[in-house]
């Protein structure tokens, strides 16, 4: 993983959930649930090829999908798993941008459930994709909210 600097763009998305922090935390580590809100035909026009998770610190994940005939494998390594408060992982596309960005998911209790704050720090060379990255996470977290309704 590349060291982070102040020049690396960061995108932040905050969402409220009517669910316990533990439940929101757990959906990040459940391949069946990822197919409901992060990947697959329920989320966008794509086919899930394979979703694999090794849910431990230094464990790796691989989320392979087929879009427009091409297989895209989103990969990363878990840097921190502190249930139910924080998940930190690297994020990239195999062969293109592995471990070049870091995603931090922070979950705090609220009166009606919890608040999730996602911060995605991109490598500076991906700065032009910051708005697209924010839109993508916003869309997926909206889908995640739907799973708790």
Image (cartoon, helix red, strand yellow):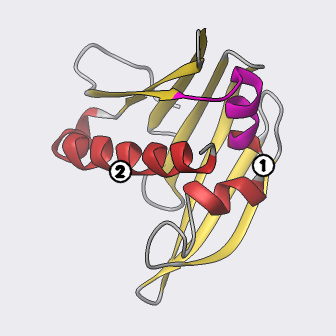
Quadrant of the rendered image containing residue 85: top right
Which residue is at 77% across, 59% downward? Answer: 32
Which residue is at 32% across, 16% downward? Answer: 5
Q: Nearer the viewer, residue 125 or 137?
A: 137
Residue indicated by mark 2: 136
Q: Is residue 108 above or below residue 38?
A: above
Circle 2 packing at 10 Å, graded few (<14), some (14-19), many (20+), is few
Residue 3 drawn in magenta: no
User: Secondary structure beneath disc 2?
Assistant: helix
User: Secondary structure beneath disc 1?
Assistant: loop
Q: Position of residue 78 (x, y in %)?
A: 69, 32
Boundaries of the magenta span:
17-27
Q: Nearer the viewer, residue 69 or 118?
A: 118
N-terminal-most mark, 1 or 2: 1
Q: Is residue 18 above or below residue 97?
A: above
Image quarter of the C terminus: top right
Q: Nearer the viewer, residue 5 or 63?
A: 63
Which residue is at 44% across, 36% downward? Answer: 101
Q: Position of residue 127 (x, y in %)?
A: 20, 38
Residue 106 visible from this viewpoint = no
Q: Is residue 49 above or below residue 31?
A: below
Residue indicated by mark 1: 30
Q: Position of residue 29 (x, y in %)?
A: 75, 42
The total of numbered circles placed on residues is 2
Which residue is at 71% across, 54% downward? Answer: 33
Q: Is residue 59 above or below residue 104?
A: below
Q: Is residue 86 left or right of residue 91?
A: right
Q: Position of residue 76 (x, y in %)?
A: 62, 44
Instruction: Spot the residue most to the bottom.
Output: 69
């Amino acid at each position: 993983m590349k060291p982070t600097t102040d020049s690396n763009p960061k995108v932040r998305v905050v969402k409220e959930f009517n669910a316990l922090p533990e439940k929101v935390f757990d959906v990040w580590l459940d391949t069946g649930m990822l197919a409901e809100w992060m990947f697959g035909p329920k989320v966008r026009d794509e086919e899930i090829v394979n979703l694999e998770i090794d849910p431990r610190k230094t464990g790796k994940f691989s989320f392979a999908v087929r879009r427009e005939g091409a297989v895209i494998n989103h990969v990363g390594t878990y840097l921190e798993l502190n249930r139910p408060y924080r998940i930190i992982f690297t994020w990239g596309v195999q062969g293109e941008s592995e471990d070049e960005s870091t995603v931090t998911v922070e979950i705090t209790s609220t009166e009606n459930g919890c608040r999730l704050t996602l911060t995605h720090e991109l490598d500076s060379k991906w700065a032009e994709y910051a708005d697209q990255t924010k839109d993508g996470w916003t869309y997926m977290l909206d889908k995640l909210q739907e799973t708790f309704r």
